[in-house]
């Protein structure tokens, strides 16, 4: 293997000639072999956006000459476009508050820029990963900024996927709108609803989720870019600090802003907890919906689509595997939130040294939720109602008696319930017909009466 | 013991004559002896507000005659005012989706109303806990509504307490504004900041928390009141459904509204996860602040007030016990959030049967955070700076070299660092004076230069 | 109010004359008003056992004169016997690593001992809470030791309660042993089992839990008693250190021992995590069992006992409230485990300052689980089988086809499944009779064949 | 792309000719695109061991002819040896209770066996993935069994790595055994210990961890292999059920056994919670140790080795990146435990459908901990003591006064403390010399007296 030698404060190290990364990446590669998961490329891309913004700022202010700036900018753009993915080999689980990942990006951009300008890789006297590419930056401002940029972009994708899933349930709401069934509370038969109303509740929950996810973006727009090491901006010129956020807005197309209190923004990471909490609320809804669908299918009120054979032993068995996958992914997201909270709460003094883990789980949760919603929508679209299944439970349920509460009151309705159970009748309606006459029963148990919001006019036992 | 006999679907039971509660409470008391924690009285009071609103609605619409309504209303107000606290003996950890707590409130109000009207307790033919007090209601709409009302009222108290704590840190920010010290990242000396800036970061984090907590209220304003058992409003007249939320607004003074999709609002409880997530973000900030203060005190840069003797063996020892209490309370809140999420995600079909546990942890977290902020503010107010402690680390820290980065670049600064370490000098300033001359050193290391945002003008090695 | 004045390093304070506690308790009472939960009296009792053991040791070694020792011993015994409960008013959530609770016990014992000896309360020149009662002790050794003692005693109670619940399920196993029903995997019908086998699985899981809980005790037997402040035993004579653990064994009747590495035992608290993890495994089993029972009841294969009316609106509704309470209590325990782990992992240097919170959750989980098992056993004892419900699903389930796999193979069985679904037959057995003849069907689907472990002899398509 | 057509109950599908997997894998690949993490190859290898054991059993009992058995066995061994890794492309996060992974293994073994026997891939009439390879098995018994096998093998590796780390700390214990320093409790100076004792505490904690991890294996040895779909062994001959576990013992070299209650073992997954809880205890210890080292380094009592440059802005800065990585990995493991508990507690009826997620986190935690211990040991080996740093704090600490408690008592020692603080002396020893004479001070503060366990003989103020 051809190598080039690079040097840092700890000494010299051989780097494979074929790679764009340099000595800092190489050391980190040896230091951290933990999880087998690489740093999210979405984060790498966001870092490249920050690098490009810093480079354009330095160019405009005269801190970087044009040829270098153009090359650095081009290298950054290549990463943003999805190239050079193999050049970011570091384990996502790394110490150093993101320094290794920032260094990795600095080195790849530097060497790619050198290449563009026909310089050999490693010729850092011309373009230096730190002095040139990282100019006026610190990991402590670019890294949290990049997490926010990546998160906002993923939040937008997630919002779109939630909308799709919501749309599927709204379609089902209409499809199943006239199917009356027994509602259930605490796994016991309660009063009637329509199957459509159940799916409408799913759609409504997702609508809240969309709103949440949409509003989330606000929490992430304020960045500490320009604050350098501890938020004081030491080593960066004031003009840079003011301009770089504008450039980042241009590069990303996002409505980002600079925190008024850069020291505070650098020392705390609470916005990640807040956003993660919102993803968790969505994950909770997904679990609830998936579980409800499993139960409705178990009861035979709906029919889930088959997507694969269910068993290596039981022929013909089809399992709700997609729903199980939804639940599992959502459990993982729910609990990623605890990782993020522990990372954020135990950061110390001027920065949060546990951002790599927090970022891994935040971006991971977002990527996973995007996939989950997409998978779920495709599946839910093929759910069918079973009208006979719905009717089966409805007809035999004494819970229908509740509809007569306005007529008879709670105590008498309780007595009716006992009477029905003693009567031996199978269908409660037959029992009620005998008791109240078919006309009244038909009126009280009419689909309209059972499912409209409240009754028109009521008996007034005051 | 004198008793009265009451009856329900399961049979007769003796109730102590001295209590206002009835048979449903009595059974629940026997059924649930789990945690030793009683239902939060804040929740009981909020339920009484809902009862009063329902009663006024039924009165206005002619579903309840005036004498009864007045008595029920008065009984409710007594509870809201803080009376009758001993009449709510149930364990907070209870099955039944809140039914037992709702029944408890119905029974106490019914018997107190009977008493007001000179009827004997238990004479339910006149005022019935369910038929009269609970008229047009179900646990499934009044219970989650009451949790929301209680939570909003607590959120407002919490917001005020956070503001006080924030105020204390702002005061310290000014007090400590001119004390320069070394900043620390990853527990290593980094570049200088002021002690005031550190406290300003605390204040800023709390300012975000206040905003969060303030915005939280929105998430809780939408209720399912009027939806009765499953959100269809079955057994309630339409006029009631539309009026009762207005009455609740009047009774509580809160900007509540009725959900458009009552079935959905009844089936899901995701807003509690969202609010809890926000409380968690605040808890994370509290842990971070308390930990930072412990470390600054350990290093001798600040001096914490003594509030009690610290040791049963080491005389004179004073421990940061208030900070430890802050951290512990915050850990508990952080993790209450997981309880809430598990409760919310595993609710089934038309309601969430685990609301009692979710409510216990949500209201408990709010009450605890109110106390924590109050305790913390009282303590933080007495924190003193140690200027000598701050100076001690600042003077010997080679991290000051970073300030010369604009002059010399990263690589040269690294070399300087090695040179200083080899020099045997104790104070880095002396070393720098020899190297660069006192004039430049004084300028670069001037308090203004070190702590203002960015430098004025920079050398341009492009 | 009559008061007495006491004094500590911070100054003088008035203490109500009526209480046994002293100035350290009084200050802590003012400092910590957080959770409203008091320190578990089980922990207070365990501390009193430690106090008694230390007192007997000091007596035997000549460090305490007999009259004082006898009075201190008697005061300790009174607490152990359950007296003086109102004298321990401190909030469970307190900073100070347990110092306040230790001081509270020291003070109450001192003043009660003074009273026994006809001295006035507060006359500490004769019996001093620290110099006499706490002699040769530090909070840092007595407090964790007391948590362990309390936990072991609770573990034994828990073990007995789990055994009772296990016994109930074993009884049901026999009762339901001959009821064949369809098994379900992933909420889909699978192959047949007996209802008894399902309950046997519950009993078996609880049997594992009992074993776990029993083995737990080992993890807690090693204490750091005698190590004083940091495990070096400083200020305690060697003879005391060696004798006190023997005395504690006598006082508690538990097989306790002294850690070989007292510094390590004082600095770490991992045994609490281990024990809590085991309680969590039990809690997971309880949730699973309670959920299964809810589902079997929903499906109508079993019938749960009614323990209270289920609804304030739906007459006759009976809900599985006990199971819901089991689930909620278990969720809380499961998640208490995270509190404990966070406390244990973030302790610093020579002790764990977060033991008060860890202890609160550990002892709380134990107390709660004891109650949960007791409540569950009482309830489960009255569960009934519904043979008709079991038969209903069994007869119509095509999953029965799996039993013919040895005869026909997986692919052919799959074809049979399709054929049955196309046939319009309602009961799979009728279909099979036509296909294979009643004799073979009767043999393959015989209760014995379906539920015995494996088949006798099989066709050998090798 | 060349393809072959395969068929299942859902219809036909084209499979790339180049792969060994078949239609079930192909469908699952399309169904689950969630996490980007593949199924752990350790689990695949363990499944191959189970397949080999089943194959040998079927051969011995005459259910499989020799040529087929030999080919299947060889294919399994190839996987066990680490080959064919690219043939297992499925997302670790999958629904279906492990069916897809089991199918994947069945298909790869079938096609590889066909290839060995010179049959074309997909010629399942000769060797069928389900009928031949999966013969007498169900996912529901082989999958949890394989998780256990994989976990036990990883536990053994982990135990060895913990031993190495323990060894490193024991070496440091000896190295630093004579360095006296001030101990700290609650981040405040307490009484003296040796630096060696601190490292000894680390070693001791790891020794407990080793013991835990070693004992863990017992929890996993009991498997449900032979139980097939729901633990009744339906479709498997009794002889197979009894023999297969013996074969698995041979193949794995592990002391596995068959559960007496196969239904129970199939329905519950609590042993994974128990094992995970034990890994969590270890993770808590790692966090505590890593944090302590960070603090000792911050205080300058030890010196951590440099493994990479620490900052992209501050030259010469070296951060405790390895310790941060240890902490982050351990946080993740701690919280994986919550994922496992939620999966295990929410399994339903006859199996646990969430095993894929539980297994992912259990095996992931084990693999991560192995790496963490290895990384930590390499790092810790190079930690140096700073005797001057230790002496610096020791000399000025008034906490030394505690050593005089046996001489003067708690109250007088408190007065001494005030006197010292008022004296203006810098070093407490100078103050004490004046007070008590050098001879006594030298004796009381001798290294032996300060650090041995307890004192020889004490003054007896009884």
Image: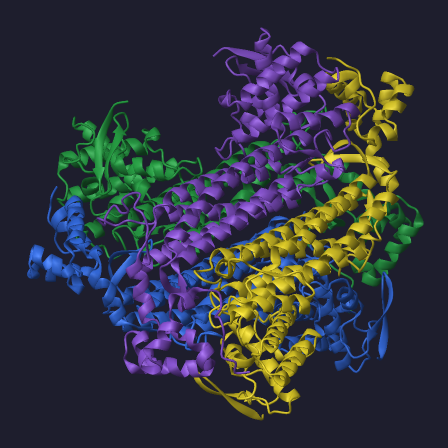
Chain colours: A green, B blue, C yellow, D purple
Where on the picture, by quarter, is residue C376? bottom right
Residue C207 on image: x %, y %: 74, 47
Whether residue B154 is visible to the viewer of this picture, yes or no, is no
* Labels in figure, total: 0
The quadrant of the image that shows the N terminus of chain C is: bottom right
The quadrant of the image that shows the C terminus of chain C is: top right
Q: Nearer the viewer, residue B423 or C187?
A: B423
Q: Indicate whether A338 appears above or below D40.
A: below
Where on the picture, by quarter, is residue A17? top left
Residue B24 on image: x %, y %: 78, 66
Residue found 60% across the figure and 92% down from its top: C120
Residue D206 on image: x %, y %: 49, 49
Q: Nearer the viewer, residue A35 or A322?
A: A35
Residue A87 on image: x %, y %: 32, 31
Residue found 43% across the figure and 83% down from its top: D412
Q: Nearer the viewer, residue B336 or D82?
A: D82
**Residue extending furthest right?**
A423
**Residue extending furthest bottom?**
C2
Q: Indicate whether D5 appears above or below B408.
A: above
Whether residue B249 is visible to the viewer of this picture, yes or no, is yes
**Left or right: where D97 falls relative to B385:** right
Residue found 18% across the figure and 34% down from its top: A70
**Left or right: where A320 falls relative to C101:** right
């Amino acid at each position: 293997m051809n190598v080039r030698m690079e040097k840092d404060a700890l000494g010299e190290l051989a780097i494979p000639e074929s790679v764009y990364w340099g000595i800092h990446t190489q050391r980190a590669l040896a230091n951290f072999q933990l999880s087998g998961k690489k740093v999210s490329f979405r984060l790498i891309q966001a870092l490249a956006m920050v690098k490009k913004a810093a480079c354009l700022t330095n160019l405009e202010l005269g801190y970087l000459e044009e040829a270098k700036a153009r090359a650095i900018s081009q290298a950054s753009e290549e990463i943003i476009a999805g190239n050079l993915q193999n050049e970011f080999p570091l384990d996502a689980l790394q110490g150093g508050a993101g320094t290794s990942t920032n260094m990795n990006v600095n080195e790849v951009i530097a060497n790619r820029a050198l290449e563009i300008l026909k310089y050999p890789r490693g010729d850092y006297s011309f373009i230096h990963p730190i002095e040139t590419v990282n100019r006026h930056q610190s990991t402590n401002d670019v890294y949290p900024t990049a997490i926010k940029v990546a998160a906002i972009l993923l939040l937008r994708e997630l919002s779109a996927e939630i909308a799709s899933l919501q749309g599927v349930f709204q379609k089902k709401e209409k499809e199943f709108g006239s199917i009356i069934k027994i509602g259930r509370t605490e796994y016991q038969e309660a009063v009637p609803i329509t199957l459509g109303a159940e799916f409408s509740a799913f759609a409504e929950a997702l609508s809240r989720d969309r709103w949440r996810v949409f509003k989330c973006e606000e929490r992430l727009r304020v960045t500490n870019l320009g604050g350098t090491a501890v938020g004081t901006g030491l080593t960066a010129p004031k003009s840079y600090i003011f301009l770089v956020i504008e450039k980042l807005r241009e590069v990303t197309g996002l409505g980002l802003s600079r925190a008024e209190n850069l020291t505070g923004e650098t020392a705390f990471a609470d916005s990640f907890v807040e956003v993660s909490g919102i993803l968790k609320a969505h994950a909770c809804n997904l679990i609830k919906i998936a579980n409800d669908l499993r139960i409705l299918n178990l009861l035979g009120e709906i029919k889930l689509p088959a997507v694969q054979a269910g068993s290596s032993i039981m022929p013909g068995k089809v399992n709700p595997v997609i729903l199980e996958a939804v639940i599992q992914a959502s459990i993982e997201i729910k609990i990623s939130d605890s990782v993020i909270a522990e990372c954020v709460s135990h950061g110390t003094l001027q920065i949060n040294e546990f951002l790599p883990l927090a970022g891994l789980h935040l971006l991971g949760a977002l990527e996973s939720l995007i996939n989950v919603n997409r998978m779920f929508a495709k599946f839910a679209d093929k759910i069918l109602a079973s009208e006979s299944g719905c009717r089966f439970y409805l007809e035999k349920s004494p819970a229908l008696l509740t509809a007569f509460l306005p007529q008879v009151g709670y105590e008498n309705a309780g007595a009716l319930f006992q009477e029905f159970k003693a009567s031996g009748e199978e269908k409660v309606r037959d029992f009620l017909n005998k008791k109240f006459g078919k006309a009244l029963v038909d009126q009280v148990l009419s689909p309209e009466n059972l499912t409209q919001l409240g009754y028109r006019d009521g008996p007034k036992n005051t």
